């Protein structure tokens, strides 16, 4: 799959990327119901069991940035989506400090790098995106978290925004729209971010 994607360019590449994102969103919707039921149990067990019964994965570092506030981290457990996001974002000059497979690693990456934006999936193992967002905002109240998920339920949107998320975008999303939102947060002055409208929330 990676070799095929590497040979695609321009509009053809973007079209294939969006189709694959659509497929991943279908997968995510199918498991979101079960995972949401497990999330409460997982969050109760995580502090007690993570060091005892689980081997914690090492966050995958991409590369260091001379300016972390102009860079992002990605929290996404689907490897296809991870690869596509990295390909799209790096092609457009967006620096990626690291990729996490679960919410706990995302929190650790944030604490280590203090990026300008965290791109967060909701349904991940070990710790879900809402709990990870809460912990990131507890660590830094000025942190910016962009939720990218297939779950468009109103209740989930409300929970994510109450946790401190700056944006909530549902998959599949047009690549240009995603780039526009990410660049907005990375390059706009702080007061503009706080006073912006919700025009990008879909």
Image: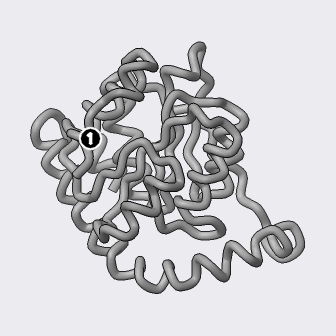
Q: Quadrant of residue 186?
A: top left
One can see residue 24 in this view: no
Q: Is residue 175 left or right of residue 111?
A: left
Residue 96, horizontal then vertical, whole percent: 50, 32
Left/right placement of residue 198 relative to residue 99 reads: left
Q: Is residue 175 above or below residue 133?
A: above
Q: Residue at x 72, y 51 (%)?
A: 58
Question: Where is residue 181 shown, x and y percent of the image?
Answer: 30, 34
Pick the residue in front: 193 or 111: 193
Q: How is the image coloured?
A: one colour
Residue sticking out furthest to the front: 195
- Residue occupying the point 52% across, 85% down: 37
Asked if residue 193 is positioned above or below residue 86 in the image, the reply reads above
Observer able to see residue 158: yes
Crowding near the residue tagged with mark 1, few <14, some 14–19, many ≥20 C-alpha atoms within 10 Å: few
Q: Which residue is mark 1?
A: 198
Which image quarter holds the N terminus?
bottom left
| Residue 51 horizontal side relative to residue 66, left or right | right
């Amino acid at each position: 799959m990676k070799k095929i994607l590497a040979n695609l360019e321009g509009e053809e590449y973007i079209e294939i990327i969006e189709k694959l994102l659509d497929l991943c969103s279908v997968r995510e919707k199918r498991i979101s119901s079960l995972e949401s039921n497990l999330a409460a149990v997982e969050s109760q067990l995580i502090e007690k069991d993570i060091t005892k019964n689980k081997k914690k994965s090492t966050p995958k570092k991409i590369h260091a940035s001379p300016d972390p506030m102009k860079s992002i981290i990605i929290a996404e457990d689907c490897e296809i989506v991870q690869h596509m996001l990295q390909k799209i974002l790096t092609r457009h000059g967006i620096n990626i400090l690291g990729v996490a497979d679960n919410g706990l690693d995302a929190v650790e990456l944030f604490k280590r790098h203090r990026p300008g934006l965290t791109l967060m999936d909701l349904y991940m193992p070990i710790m879900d995106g809402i709990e990870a967002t809460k912990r990131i905002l507890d660590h830094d109240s000025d942190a910016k978290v962009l939720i990218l998920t297939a779950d468009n339920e109103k209740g989930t949107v409300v929970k994510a925004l109450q946790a401190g998320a700056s944006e909530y975008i549902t998959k599949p999303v047009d690549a240009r729209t995603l780039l526009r939102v990410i660049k907005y947060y990375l390059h706009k002055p702080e007061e503009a971010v706080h006073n912006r409208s919700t025009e990008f929330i879909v």
